[in-house]
Amino acid sequence: MIGNDLVDLLCAKQESNWQRPRFLEKLFTPTEITYIENAINPLLAVWSLWSKKESVYKIIARLEKRRFFAPKKIECLFAGTTAAGILPQETNNVVYQNQFFKTTSFFKEHFIHTIAYQESAVPFVLMEDYYIENKYCSTQTKTVRKKLIAAYASHTHLTKEFMSIQKDVNGIPFLYYKDKKESIPISLSHHGNYVGFAIAFEASQFRPNFV
Amino acid sequence: MTNEELIQSLKKIVKPYIQDEAAFDKLTKDTRFIEDLKVNSANLVDIILDVEDEFDIIIEDEAMEEMLNVKAAMDIISTKLADK
């Protein structure tokens, strides 16, 4: 299982006011709020925790086959408090109803890209992200799907003309090859001027071009 | 407040966050905020906070969990207003 989430920081700054009353309390646990309030860059702290929750949520939605909005139930864990502030926990850093997830957030120039997976099955993850000038949702959806298919085709040596991505009734995306659902989990994300995806290969399925 | 009035004030709240005008124009009770209106998931909380402010109600986490479409939002608002 894999989840990914991308936050365009400039866009987040325009679209959301994390300082509005009750905003943090609706999304974050008391420990998370303390972490945010003590962070050197609270804006970055807000959106990195959010992207961790969101990428884990995508895994849960896939597993439970349902949609819900309960950001506080998906809880970020912290290693402990020191003089320098609360330290984020490196591994197993998100928990939802006793299930642990690993997340890694990549901080790039204007965006955060986070991937999440279950600790029990560490996959070979292929993740990519792109800047897109066009902010229209439909354009971004098309672009990210095209990019994912191209990446998948190049790593599996399958013909990309036979591939498609379809969402189920819960809005969860699946990869299809010759109209047959592929078992490999995928995750898509777009925000602001950025799109990204992650594919979780099993070791046996991973055949990069160069080997 | 009638259902029609409720749906109109909800539309006013949701409008700044939508990214799909066509879906918004033909909004029904079954319209989903994220999948249909393309509301960014982080803005779902703004819709909830705006609803709280507009109707002077508090939406608890349990109710918020289901507030993903127009009908669920209407049900929660109506229940809260009736309890007032």
Image (tube, coloured by chain):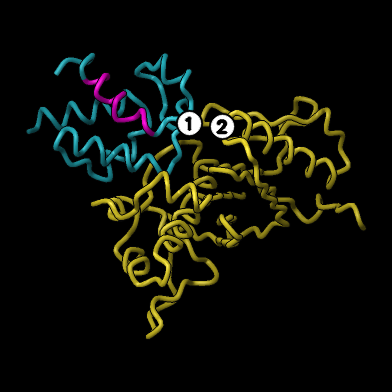
Main structural element of the magenta stretch: helix, strand or loop?
helix
Compare residues A67 and A100 and report the one nearer the observer: A67
Asked if disc 1 and disc 2 are in contact, CB closer than 8 Å, the reply is yes
Q: Circle 2 sits in a helix, a strand or a loop, which is it? A: helix
Chain B appears what colour? cyan
Q: In the displayed structure, does residue A67 sit left or right of residue A34?
A: right
Q: Circle 1 sits in a helix, a strand or a loop, which is it? A: loop
What is the letter of the yellow chain?
A: A
Q: In the displayed structure, does residue A199 sit left or right of residue B32?
A: right
Quarter in which the C terminus of chain A is drawn: bottom right
Residue A116 visible (yes or no):
no
* Disc marking residue A137: 2
Compare residues A133 and A202 and report the one nearer the observer: A133
Q: Quadrant of residue A117?
A: bottom right
Q: Position of residue A198 (x, y in %)?
A: 66, 49
Subunit of label 2: A
Subunit of label 1: B
Residue B71 visible (yes or no):
yes
Which residue is pictured at 26% across the width and 19% down the height? B8
Which residue is pictured at 42% across the width and 46% down the height? A14
Direction bottom: furthest residue: A83
Q: Position of residue A41 (x, y in %)?
A: 42, 67
Q: Position of residue B12 (x, y in %)?
A: 29, 25
> Which residue type carries mark 2?
Cys
Task: Name the residue that disc number 1 marks.
Answer: B38
| Separation of marks 1 and 2 at Cα, in angstroms | 8 Å
Which residue is pictured at 86% across the width and 38% down the height? A158
Magenta range is B6-16
Mark 2: few, some, or many residues within 10 Å (few <14, many ≥20)? some
* Disc marking residue A35: none
> Which residue type carries mark 1?
Lys
Direction right: furthest residue: A211
